[in-house]
Amino acid sequence: MILDLKELYKKQPIKTNFCECGKGQPSTTMQTTKTIMYYLLELELMNRENSFFNTTAESGQLLMNYESIAKGQETDILSVFNVGDKLTPYEVEFKLSRSNKTMLIGSVKRGLTNLTSKGKLTKLNEMREGAYGRKNYLWTLK
């Protein structure tokens, strides 16, 4: 991949307190350097198995925090599975709440999908009645 630094700078300039030549102007070099740093961090997140889906175009430290939270949620989800367990997303949420770990059902579903993609869980072709009287697929440890 070839980086076009001018386009990158236009996309996400970062203001700093550093001045160039004492003229009171933000340093373009520092802005570009910080922009590249954040861009490279984002590339690092994109090039590995992400847990957080950046649909809100977050960047920098905030993006890294969200990724860390999502990875922690996946660890929590895995922790409620025992060998032979077959659980729906709502059962996972319930088991988490009994362990004093609250998680939105959307986060549970995202975590189950990610863990399935990463080969840690298997989505079964079996279903069980879940919340609101609807059938839900079951997941198990791989």
Image (cartoon, rainbow, N blue to C red):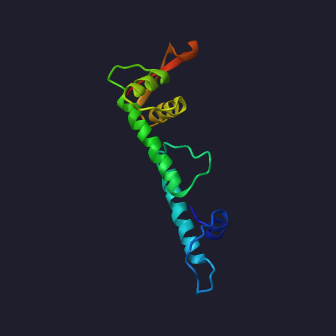
Q: In this rendering, would 104 be left or right of 119?
A: right
State the quadrant of the N terminus.
bottom right
Q: At x 41% / y 28%, what residue is drawn?
A: 96
- Quadrant housing residue 87: top left
Could you tell me which residue is drawn at 62 percent across and 47 percent down? 56
- Residue 91 vs residue 19, the one in the foreground: 19
Q: Residue 117 location, x and y as percent?
A: 47, 35
The image shows residue 32 at horizontal and vertical percentages of 58, 71
- Return the x and y of residue 97 as percentages of the image width and height: 42, 27
Which residue appears farthest toward the left when viewing the image? 83
Rendered image quadrant of residue 100: top left
Q: Residue at x 56, y 55 (%)?
A: 59
The reply to whether residue 133 is visible in this rendering is: yes
The quarter holding residue 134 reads top right
Question: What residue is rendered at 58% in x and 80% in y?
Answer: 19
Relative height, residue 79 to residue 88 (above, below): below
Q: Is residue 47 visible?
A: no
Q: Quadrant of the C terminus?
A: top left
Left or right: 120 in relation to 41: left
Q: How many marks?
A: 0
Say whether residue 34 is left or right of residue 97.
right
Query: Compared to 125, does 10 lie above or below?
Result: below
Residue 86, image x, y percentages: 41, 19
Foreground pick, 49 / 30: 30
